[in-house]
Amino acid sequence: MNRRTKGVLRGGHSPDIGKATQFKRGNLGGGRPKKTPITEIFEELLADPQTRDAIKGQVRRTLTKHGMAGVLLLREMADRLEGKVANSVDVNLSGKVTLEQVLEARRRAGK
């Protein structure tokens, strides 16, 4: 919370700093579009059965010949069409970590 004192914010800053770049009332900026053009292209390509079969064959050839490039292409398409996979985080809120907890976490992580 900012407290103004004689036209100056706490810390000695002018309240006008950044006003030019702030959103105006009622104008929230729009944000990111719901579907990007590349997502629409992927959806269109995968909707047609013949194109989908051709893509399957090409993906097989790419994976066989180029390995990682094909994997990256598949991941990009899946992320755009199905959403990125969420990572889960286990948080210890007590602030205390026991040796057993560390060893168990390392075991689960495969270390």
Image: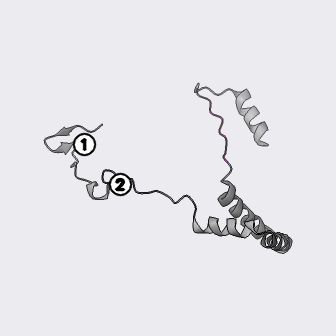
**Residue 49, how many percent across, how many down?**
80, 68
> Circle 1 — which element?
loop
Foreground residue among 10 and 61: 61
Pick the front one: 89 or 74: 74
Question: Looking at the image, which residue is at 83% across and 70% down?
Answer: 53
Look at the picture and state if 88 lies above or below 74: above
Exactly how many numbered labels are in the figure?
2
Q: Which residue was labeled with disc 2?
A: 27
User: Where 44 falls versus 90 (above or below)?
Assistant: below
Quadrant of the rendered image containing residue 50: bottom right
Is disc 2 placed on a helix, strand or loop? loop
Segment tinted magenta in the rendering: 86-92
Q: Where 6 sits versus 48, above or below?
A: above
* Horizontal side, residue 53 vs residue 89: left or right: right
Above or below residue 89? Residue 57 is below
Give me the disc on residue 100.
none
Question: On the image, which quarter does residue 7 sit in?
Answer: top left
Q: Is residue 22 magenta?
A: no
- Residue 40 in the figure: left or right of residue 64: left
Percent coordinates x, y for residue 85 in the rendering: 68, 50
The amino acid sitting under disc 1 is Gly
Between the C-alphas of marks 1 and 2, the distance is: 29 Å
Taking the image as shown, residue 13 lies to the left or right of residue 104, namely left
> Where is residue 12 drawn, in percent x and y?
21, 45
Q: Quadrant of the N terminus?
A: top left
Q: Which residue is mark 1?
A: 11
Tell me where residue 46 appears, x and y as whole percent. 74, 66
